[in-house]
Amino acid sequence: MNYNEKYQKWVSKEDLDPALKAELLSMDETVKEDAFYTDVEFGTAGMRGILGAGTNRLNIYVIQKANVGFAKYIASLPEGKERGVAIGYDNRHMSYKFAIESAKVLATYGIKSYIFESLRPTPELSFAVRYLKCAGGIMITASHNPKEHNGYKVYDDTGCQLLPEAADQVVQYVNEVEDELNIKVFSDEEAYPYMTWIGEEVDEAYYKEVMAIEVNPGMDKSDFKIVFSPQHGTSNIAVRTCLTRLGYDLVPVLAQCAPDPDFSNTKSPNPEVPASYELAIKKAKEVDADVVVITDPDGDRLGVVAKHNGEYVLMSGNQSAAVYLEYILSQMKEKGTLPDNAVMYNTIVTSDLGELVARSYGVDVEKTLTGFKFIGDKIRKYEQTHEKTFVFGYEESYGCVIKDFVRDKDAVQAVLTAAEAGNFYKKQGKDLVDVLNELYAKHGTFKETQIALSKAGAAGAARIKEIMDNLRKDAPQEIGGVKVVKVEDYGNSTCSDGTTIQLPKSNVLKYYLEDGSWIAARPSGTEPKCKFYFSIKGSDADDAASKTEVFHKAMMEIIGE
């Protein structure tokens, strides 16, 4: 069925949601094609898409279809129907509606659901799955995407996002749905007996675990000030509750605390975008804060700004995680609590700095594909075998987990770690940037950047495929005048040195350069983008910055952009 046939099917449905019908009737040909040329697909973090009418949009019909697949998957598990599914949702348009629709579809298949009474951060949903001993979980969120988007993430019984094998089963069930516009769904009255509302009990259990991650719980906090913004999202209550109870002087950016689906008081809800920090830094200057912390709307990513030599300096996800690692591991070693078999996890597109920090303390490092579910799977493996003991996990995109009572990125834990590390080092006359510079002096200076080429629609998808195909067919021998010494192709599990990559196949290419730098390319699993990751090693900060500009230009020339 081509896009126009799908469009006609939708626009002809008599009882279609009136708002969606009006949108369909207003579409021009370009919008029509983009809305129907494909279906929203599961990526590295579930489904994300623009809200609206169409099979390539997020709406109640697409959500119902996805839940049919997940319901059949849950029903296939031992006691899956009785164990049920925990459901959380963020502040975005349609999030609550999608959560209720999810519960109603599950009920239609005889599956219990446990729904948060109001919005909660994604890591608390992961925790709730484990706490309530559910068979799975659903989080309605588009993470850090723009306000026009929403999304749907699914979790297994360990609170980890579904791994590829399980996700493939769900997708197979989803694809068996022949008509997304005529799915049988229980009425509210029929579904309510299967639905249970959850709130304070799970909140308090989660807060207790978060507060227990402190490495130095007795440390005086009276002279350390933190400015915090949830970016209109879900982490507001959790972060303010935990840090206030622990005695921190936490100053909220009140204009960004209301759960606003339009993100009215921020230029971007994404901590990776410098403009998202403007109001928080303004408040920090007013109150002379030591650290600024902002989370993304679903509370799984954290951005940190540290006061350094009188200026507020934005730290990348790679940089802040390296500093957290230094603090946690140094203190564990000093206290004699660092396990002999300790292991840290990060991804194949994460900076080398964190690995060097970990290994300097005798901590093993294991790499995973992009997607925090792979880190969660590593945690599960060693929880069962006891071969290694987890001490930290992170990825470059501002996400980490400190303790494994959550199996996803947890910005609430990260806020507490940033606050504790900042307070600890302030008492030594240092700030977080000072510590980062010390790590550079010890391990080498790295500059990590990213170029994300947005390529929307059918033409965009074709262009992304063309870029990756061309790179495979004609791998660069040098980039920016620096020789490529090794190429890893995760799509076919091969390496140019003849070794085999022992990870699941993924559409990623990674180029190692003679100077110790590397560059990776991969299509995004959640957005219509082709991403290029740069980890550039220099003799100092200026050298690394200069080389980064050269590599950026060279890589874009190679792909013809």
Image (cartoon, rainbow, N blue to C red):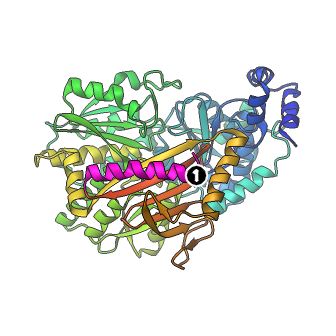
Snapshot quadrant of residue 445: bottom left
Tell me: 408 left or right of 23: left
Q: For mark 1, give the secondary structure.
A: helix
| Quadrant location, the C terminus | top right
Snapshot quadrant of residue 265: top left
Reading the image, the residue beneath label 1 is 559
Q: Which segment did they paint magenta?
A: 540-561
Look at the picture and state if 281 lies above or below 76. above
Look at the picture and state if 250 lies above or below 535. above
Q: Nearer the viewer, residue 190 or 549?
A: 549
Amino acid type shown at disc 1: Ile
Look at the picture and state if 343 lies above or below 81. below
Residue 464: percent from the left, percent from the top? 64, 49
- Residue 208 in view, yes or no: no
Q: Residue at x 22, y 23 (%)?
A: 286
Residue at the bottom extreme, as displayed: 498
Q: Residue at x 59, y 67 (%)?
A: 504
